[in-house]
Amino acid sequence: MSVKHFLRNCFRRAGWDIKKFDPRSSEASHVVRQLSVHQIDVVFDVGANTGQFAEKLRDAGFSGRIVSFEPSTCAHSTLSKRAQREANWIIAPRMALGDHDGEITLNLAGNSVSSSVLPMLPSHVRAETKSRYVGSEVVDLRTLDSVSTEFATDTERIFLKLDVQGFEYKVLQGAEQFLGRVAGIQIELSLVPLYDGEHLFHPMLHDLEERGYEMWSLIPGFVDPGTGRLLQLDAIFFRDEHSRPTKVLDRNANAITDCSSIQAELADRD
């Protein structure tokens, strides 16, 4: 056994996996490259927890403005402290986002990242026992339509990241006007029911396609360690800004061609 393999096995037995880092192939680098291609100015980080997503973007080279939203008191406090080092990382007041303005009860998970306003199903707890709810708190509920103008101008190109543990569809319902300014979306989707009332992968995919977005990439996420089954993933979409008008024009062109052919055929019969 080589020294490299011996050291790798030692680290793995201790719970660590050491591998060479290639920035060109990292998931965050792929996301940042897509943001650059679509000329994104500002990222709305909805369901920020303690800022993990924002820091990955920064480490991968994204220099645009990031606006983070987080409802949990504890996570929001940590998030605010982490963002103090950056002038271009804005932390919105503590709130949940959904389909109306008001208040809502946030269920607090033992691992923090699985906290949700929806009831958690046994399938989630079986796959990650630390995700079990350990408390709750009442938080302000707002819509992106009602708060987005405070954080981005009409001319800025926006990328929306949604990681709200099953509540993604409700957030989109409260963002009908806002989505007209959103060039791209990264959204966490469940492949199996994990929260009571959530919309699963296929209905959400259909909804986003109906809104004019096309899928660019998939990032594997939550895996059941006992079975190896993928339970959640992140899907990245960008608005189909160029091909959709072309498709409409193509259909019109075909219709004109068909009408011309019919007219010519009728003329020949006369």
Image (cartoon, rainbow, N blue to C red):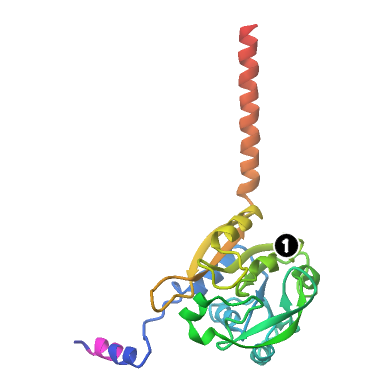
Please report the residue visible at 65 percent of the width from the left and 83 percent of the height from the top: 107
Disc 1 marks a residue whose amino acid type is Arg
Camera-side residue of 238 and 97:
97
The tally of labels here is: 1
Q: How crowded is mark 1: few (under 14 residues within 10 Å), some or many (20 or more)?
A: some
Q: In this view, does 135 lie to the left or right of 31?
A: right
Quarter of the image for residue 147 reads bottom right
**Closest to the observer: 68 or 156?**
68
Quadrant location of the N terminus?
Answer: bottom left
Q: Quadrant of residue 113?
A: bottom right
Label 1: state its secondary structure: helix
Q: What stretch is highlighted in magenta?
A: 3-8
Q: Residue at x 66, y 65 (%)?
A: 169
Residue 157 in percent (x, y) is at: 69, 65
Q: Measured from the top left, where is residue 250 in percent x and y?
A: 61, 37
- The x and y percentages for residue 13 are 32, 91
Magenta region includes residue 66: no
**Percent from the top left, x then y, of residue 236?**
56, 65
Query: Looking at the picture, does residue 156 appear above or below residue 57?
Result: above
Q: Quadrant of residue 83?
A: bottom right
Residue for badge 1: 181
